Every structure is written in C-alpha cells, then in structure tokens.
Amino acid sequence: MKSRTLWPIILGAIFVNCIVIAYVLTKAQTASSSSAQEVIAHIGKNGITREEWLSEMEERYGKSTLEDMINDRVVTQMAEKNKIKVSDDDIEREFLLIKAVYNSFYEDENTTEKEWKEQIKHNILLEELLTKDIVISDSELKSFYNKNKDLYKFDDSYRLKHIVVKDKDEAEQVLKELKEGSSFEAAAAEHSTDRYTAPYGGDLGFVNDQHENVPAEYLEKAEQLKENQWVDEPIKTSQGYAIIQLKEKLPGQAFTYSEVKNQIRRQIAMDQLGDKASVKTLWKDAKLSWFYDDKK
C-alpha cells in the first residue's frame, strides 16, 4: 500500500485525451468541409481518403475513446449529484507529492501542468465516489499515517536536466552551444551519453539528497542556480563531465495528519475495493446508454 491506486492511470488518461482531441477535431473538420473523399495519402497510383482514415480510427479507437469520454462525464455528473467537491489545496498537495515523492511528473508540448491537475481532480472525484460508503476508523487512519510519514513529506527537491559527456573539452563545447542559443533539450539529445534521459531532454525529474544515484555535486550546484539556469562550468562525475540545468525547485515540506487524512481514507478504501474499484460501477446510477449497447 505504498503507492496510490489510481496515479499510474493518469499517464494513460492524458494520452487518451490527446487521441480524443485529435480525432474529434479532425472529424469536425471533415464534416464542415465535406471533404470525406479527399485523398490524404498517396501510395503509387493508390490513395487513402480522409473517410477511410477516420473509419479506421473509429474501428481501432472508437469504443475505448467513447468509453473514456463517458467516464469523464459520469464522474462529473455523479460528483455534482452527491455534492462532492475537490479543493484547489487538495489538488495542489497531491500534485506536489506526485512530483517530489513519487517523481512521476513530466511536462512536454503534449502534457501540461494544467492537464495533470485536471486529471488529478478527476481521480480524486472518482475515488471519493467509489469509496463514499466505506468507513475507516480514525485509529486505522492515524496508524497508517504514522507508519508511512515518508509518503507525505519531502526535503528540498530539484527538477534537474543533465547532459553527460566523456571529457571536459566536449562539455565546454556543449556549454558554448548553449550560450549561443541551442536549447538544452536539443543539446542533450545530441550529446548526452545517458541513454535513459537523452531522449527526454536530459530530464532527471525531481531529485534530492535521498536519491543515492544522483551525484552530490548536482545538488550542491542546484542550490546555487535559478530556475532555467545551467551551470557555468562542467561538473566532474564518475561518468565523465556533466552540465546540469535547474528547471524547478520545491522547498521541503511535511504534511500533517489532518491535511492528508482524507487522502489516506481514500487510499485504504480503494485498496479494500481491489478490482471492484471501477468507474463502470457508477454507470447504472448515471442512467447510461450508449452506441455500443446495440453492437453486442
């Protein structure tokens, strides 16, 4: 019970949302322009029409995409019906824990902080709905908190990006490129020998002195940097030389029992539900009927 039950779903949900947006916008564009027979790809003398493409998209993703859209509306509707609300403080606290404790946060051109927070809100509402009839005693809640305080606190944490190269000359060349206007992400992809982070712009996520695999020199330098600033000189490490950039700093924080009490209640209750913890259990109360009912 060391991890949140629904947090791993966040990544998948955000990915599905991207597919939904792309599909809906394209579908709308097709309808408005009456261009269903427009050829959007040519293979020799053959072509693929927009209508064929959209039909294939619906065949592959239609049911799951519609199901996710339904689940979104069901949670919103049932939360309103049961007068369940989520405060900004609740969202911000869980977002901080995702970043600093679980180090599960990432942000790129497709996934923004706003989308993360919207998905966190959705998950909290869903958990509240699924567990609203489950009672957990105060003694059990306090016991869980006392045994797992490390889940609700973190030291000063730094979101770092790094570029690792073999020698100092190459590191200084990378620094020169950065000063001349190259993006840190592009430089990491081109130069870094860290094959795990290079494809992601060198992003290490949020780290602190509890992370044994992060060189102590990184943290010492990070304390001196401003957000989006990189070091002036290469850092000598066991892997060669590194250049780090500070993206964000989170001051250390410890949440009290009263602040996380309801979060713990949901967590324990969700674990009790096990496989029964599904949004589909809310469909009946939401009086749902859908297109795929007729396709069974």
Image: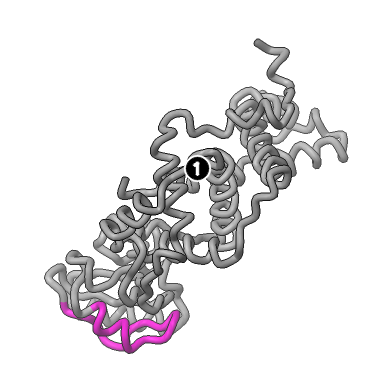
Q: Number of callouts in the render?
A: 1
The picture places residue 157, in percent across and down from the top left corner, at 34, 73
Q: Nearer the viewer, residue 71 or 196?
A: 71
- Indicate yes or no whether the magenta region holds residue 280: no
- Picture quadrant of residue 35: top right
Which residue sits at x=31%, y=82%?
Answer: 222
Q: Nearer the viewer, residue 196 or 98?
A: 98
Which residue position is annotated with label 1? 12
Q: Nearer the viewer, residue 254 or 231?
A: 254
One can see residue 83 in this view: yes
Amino acid type of the residue that numbered disc 1 sits on in the rendered structure: Gly
One can see residue 48 in this view: no
> Which residue range is magenta in the image?
218-236
- Give the answer, above or below, for where 210 lies relative to 55: below
- Give the answer, above or below, for where 201 lies relative to 119: below
Query: Looking at the rendering, in which quadrant would you find the N terminus?
Result: top left
- Picture quadrant of residue 114: bottom right
